[in-house]
Amino acid sequence: MTAIVREKRVETGTERTSRFTGHRTDALGSSPFAATVPAVVAAVVFALACLVWLVAGERLPGGRWIVIHIFTLGVLTTSIWGFSLHLAARFTGTAAHAPRLRTRAALALVLSVSIIAMLTGRAGGFHWPLVLGSVGIMAMVAVNLVQLRRLRRAGSNDRFGWVVTQYEHAHLAFLAAAGLGGAMGAGWIPGSIFTAVRTAHIHLNVLGWAGLTVGGTAGRRVRASPLSAGRGRARGGGCGRPRSRWSSGG
């Protein structure tokens, strides 16, 4: 449907100009991604810290380990944590049931402080900040997991409920990875199985936490594309579903 554009003619001396008011009569509302602002702000701050550590090199403590974990925890984890809940609310039509912006901002602050505590404890060799920071990170991801499950169950749109289920599985993978990472950092893993635990920690983060989240979101885009809808109509006679032989009346 083509939008109707209204034009106002304005005389300015001998020159006539146009002002296009568009088809909207009401003011634009808030951004659809406004709920992700706390997570985005935290991720940007961590990204800047990551750049500082890269430029400083050996002049700052932690070395390559802390640079990697500032990025994976501060930037990636915070972004996945914020956007998965936002997208889940959109996919299931439960934005009204999602936590309010102030609640998300408070949770994002707790997550950021926990990440800083864990990184500080690991880089400085402080045991309790590392343990408490790891527990705080896992707690915030667990809270997100509970909220994802609640939104999926309350959803009015079952078409993309499987995407939210993917997000839930990704959160479970992160909890397992974080538990292993915290145990390694605290020195609780024996040397005989340290390499195996480290490998599991990396794979759970890369394939589970990031892979399931990105794969589920990308899969949703593929299933919702006009091309896939057209193929469904071609198979099912226009409704996007395969038509059974019973529906033809024969």
Image (cartoon, grey):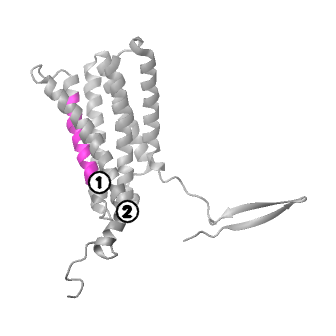
* Residue 93 seen in the figure: no
* Residue 119 seen in the figure: yes
Quadrant of image for the N terminus: bottom right
Quadrant of image for the C terminus: bottom left
The disc at residue 164 is 1
Residue visible at 27% across and 31% down?
Answer: 134
240 left or right, relative to 196: right
User: Magenta span has 177?
Assistant: yes
Residue visible at 31% across and 57% down?
Answer: 151
Pick the residue in front: 141 or 132: 141
Q: What is the quadrant of residue 239 in the picture? A: bottom left
Residue 12 image point, x, y percent: 86, 58
The disc at residue 228 is none
User: Magenta span has 129?
Assistant: no
- Give the residue type at disc 2: Leu
- Label 1: how many Cα within 10 Å (few below 14, some 14–19, many 20+): many
Segment colored magenta: 163-181
Label 2: element kind? helix
Residue 108 image point, x, y percent: 39, 39
Residue at the right extreme, as displayed: 13
- Give the residue type at disc 1: Val
Residue 155 image point, x, y percent: 32, 62
Pick the residue in front: 131 or 70: 70
Q: Which residue is mark 2?
A: 227
Residue visible at 52% across and 52% down?
Answer: 31
